[in-house]
Image (cartoon, rainbow, N blue to C red):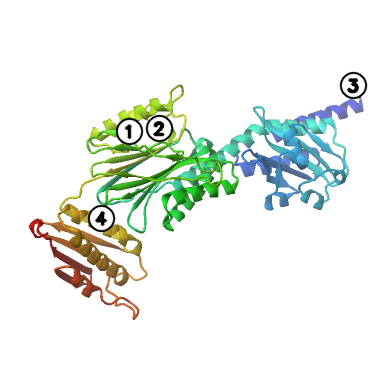
Amino acid sequence: MDLSAQQKAERSDATLRLEQIQRITDSSLGYMSLEELLSELLGRIREALGADTAAVLLLEEDRNVLVARAARGLEEEVRQGVQVPLARGFAGRVAAQAQPIVIEDLSRAEVVNPILRQKGIRSLLGVPIHVEGRVIGVLHVGTLYSRKFDDEDIGLLQLAADRAALAIDAARLSEQRAVTEMMQRTLLPDALPQVPGVRFSAKYLPAGSGIRIGGDWYDVFQLADGRLAFVIGDVVGRGVLAAAVMAEIRTALRAYLTEGHSLPSVMALLNDLLVSMERRRSATAAILELDLERGELEAVSAGHLPPLLVSPGGEPTLLDQSRGLPLGVTAGSEYVSERFAFEVGSVLLLYTDGLVERRGETIDDGLARLSVAAREAAAGVGASFADGVYRALLDETPLNDDVALLAIESLALGPKLEMTLDARPSVLAGLRSVLGRWLTNVGADDDDVFNVALAASEAAANAIEHAYGAREGTFLVRCDSDGAQARVAVADGGRWRESQPYGRGRGLALMRSLVDDVELERSDSGTTVTLVKRLTAKDER
């Protein structure tokens, strides 16, 4: 039987709709980047529905806002970074109610985004984008004329959103994964510093990849007075926001310590900063400063697990210290620092909770297991201390949380010492600190330590000022002692440049007043200043 013209038209419309749906939800969308996917999807949807505009807003769950990520006909939404609070305005209500919403006359509706009216949009249809029962965004189309979107329009747009949801979510997670991993790589130290008499080792192990990465971090750097600062921390949560909060804390912490604030003040400042950012994120952290000359640690904690100190004899002890509230919990929190001996041969281990926490166990069980692992690592040969602890605890254990651990070992200095330093004034305090330890170790008294360290610092300052000018460079410091005298040579690889009129100009005279002999060698390949100091015999003291 021949079909009527009306039936043919209806079948033709149904076929067209099916083709439109298939085209909108083409499997090739799953192989595109997020931006490419959304742009292509919106172009197909606008064509299928005969709409003037189409836009996608994705939900940032941490902040409960929808952010415009792609638009056709409403490009200003993306360029201006439009954000719509959940449950507010048109898109906010679509997401909050998780139901399609039609607005036939925009002039009578609440609108948070003024661009919709500025573009002259009259009618809107929006649907939620669902993935596994949760709303991840909103897809909406609009027309510049009054239009009554019918059930078929709603069904087509919702079907398009449903079919594209997995591809959108996968592309979004891939984007977040790339950003988070890049932030982690950028913010963790590229390399641990080289400090004579100290050996560092560290491990960072994410529980998974991408947005599963959290806000665990560690840091090591030298302060202007020569002391070493160690930091370990853990921001609650995962993904880009946790990594961003970690970056903000890490940067602020370095700034506060560089400015010379006390450890309790640094922690209090960090806490108030995190509260003021209103990120709804808390973090635990521990900051320690090491004075190698005195063999002393100062530590402050904001809710972080206690550091583990292994004695020269290999016996592990958890440092018994006051732990203040985690950062970001409440403004005005106060913190207290405490001091601990750090003898030559000792090891300090800082770590995050992923190292010791296991499902179905108490934290005490995990800390007891850590002590056993630390004892084994201290007795081991070959592997670094951090590697030894890792292998004992996590080598074949699935990770449920990120793990960061940092080990600091205090080593004895021998009669010979050599170090290469950047030609920057900031290294001078660290140089004096290391020389003080070495001189004490070879038998120098307090006066000898002061005089030789000051003379060597002056020689190094001369190398920095005269040898390289504005160029970057390094200088070498070689030390040796036979017990009767100490020799310290400072050698640069640059060409000598005379001081400007405002320069010091009395460096050599100062050095000669501090030590017994100063030897100066200049050549086209650099300058070497050798300082010789007779060590005061014990019976002369």
Distance from the alpha carbon under mark 3 to that under mark 4: 99 Å
Q: Residue at x 37, y 26 (%)?
A: 396
Residue 2 is labelled as 3
Distance from the alpha carbon under mark 3 to that under mark 2: 76 Å
> Visible in this render: residue 23?
no
> In the rendered image, which quarter is residue 404 located in?
top left
Circle 1: residue type? Val
**Discs 1, 2 touching: Cβ within 8 Å:** yes
> Visible in this render: residue 536?
yes
Say left or right for 159 vs 534: right
Label 3 or label 1, whichever comes before in sequence order: 3
Residue, disc 2:
355
Label 1 or label 2, whichever comes before in sequence order: 2
Say left or right for 98 vs 416: right
Say left or right for 53 vs 511: right
Residue count near mark 4 (Cα–Cα under 10 Å), binned few <14, some 14–19, many ≥20: many
Residue, disc 1:
389
Query: 28 or 223, which is in the foreground?
Result: 223
Does 220 sit above or below residue 514?
A: above
Circle 3: residue type? Asp
Label 3 or label 4, whichever comes before in sequence order: 3
> For the C terminus, which image quadrant?
bottom left
**Discs 1, 4 touching: Cβ within 8 Å:** no
- Looking at the rendered structure, the secondary structure element under dot 2 is helix
Distance from the alpha carbon under mark 1 to that under mark 2: 9 Å
Query: How far across and down, in percent of the image, does residue 253 sit?
Result: 46, 51
Query: How far across and down, in percent of the image, does residue 56 sit?
Result: 70, 41
> In the rendered image, which quarter is residue 434 located in?
bottom left
Distance from the alpha carbon under mark 4 to that under mark 2: 32 Å
Circle 4: residue type? Val
